[in-house]
Amino acid sequence: MYQIVFNEISAAEMAALPKDLQLDLLAEFSVLPDNLEELDPARFGALERDGKKLYRYRAKDHRLYFERSAEGITVHRVLHKNSLRDFLFRSKLSLGEDEELSKRDDFWKLIEAGAKSRKAK
């Protein structure tokens, strides 16, 4: 059995959304940790840096950034597409280029902020 775990930042980002949108996003987000290499490229992307692999899932107007973890799936960020688009514009990257995004320190700092915020159990 596996779990989908939201760190403190991604949980807050999700909680800020209307309840019906939260349910819609979670209903669409069907992924198993063992099937991450066989995901639909139209909805999923992968970013890699220093041996760490992060996945992106497109759901409605939002993007969920997650990775495989001991629990199953850990969601690091839940971002509205416009906020990510703004980030990409400010970084002068082409939209939708996971490979280029994976090279940007600013993006990884955004993700690491979520990972560091996870409460210790």
Image (cartoon, rainbow, N blue to C red):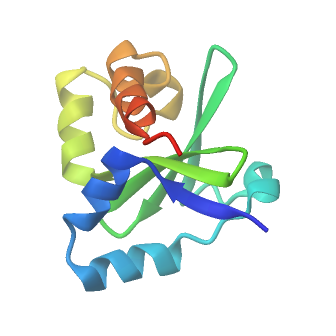
Q: Which residue appears at 39% of the width and 81% of the height?
A: 24
The answer, for residue 29, to whether it is visible in the render is yes
Quarter-of-image position of residue 31: bottom right
What percent of the width, then of the height, locates residue 12?
Answer: 27, 55
The answer, for residue 77, to whether it is visible in the render is no
Q: Which residue appears at 19% of the width and 45% of the height?
A: 83
What percent of the width, then of the height, locates residue 77?
Answer: 38, 46
Between 56 and 117, which is closer to the camera in this rendering?
117
User: Which residue is at the far bottom?
Assistant: 20
User: Which residue is at the far front?
Assistant: 121
Query: Going by the image, does 38 lie left or right of 21?
Result: right
What percent of the width, then of the height, locates residue 116?
Answer: 42, 29
Query: Going by the image, does 83 lie left or right of 58?
Result: left
Quarter-of-image position of residue 3: bottom right
Query: Going by the image, does 14 lie left or right of 108?
Result: left
Quarter-of-image position of residue 1: bottom right
Residue 18, above or below 36:
below
Between 85 and 24, which is closer to the camera in this rendering?
24
Q: Which residue appears at 64% of the width and 32% of the height?
A: 53
Residue 118, above or below 28:
above
Q: How many marks?
A: 0
Between 86 and 26, which is closer to the camera in this rendering?
26
What percent of the width, then of the height, locates residue 71?
Answer: 69, 52
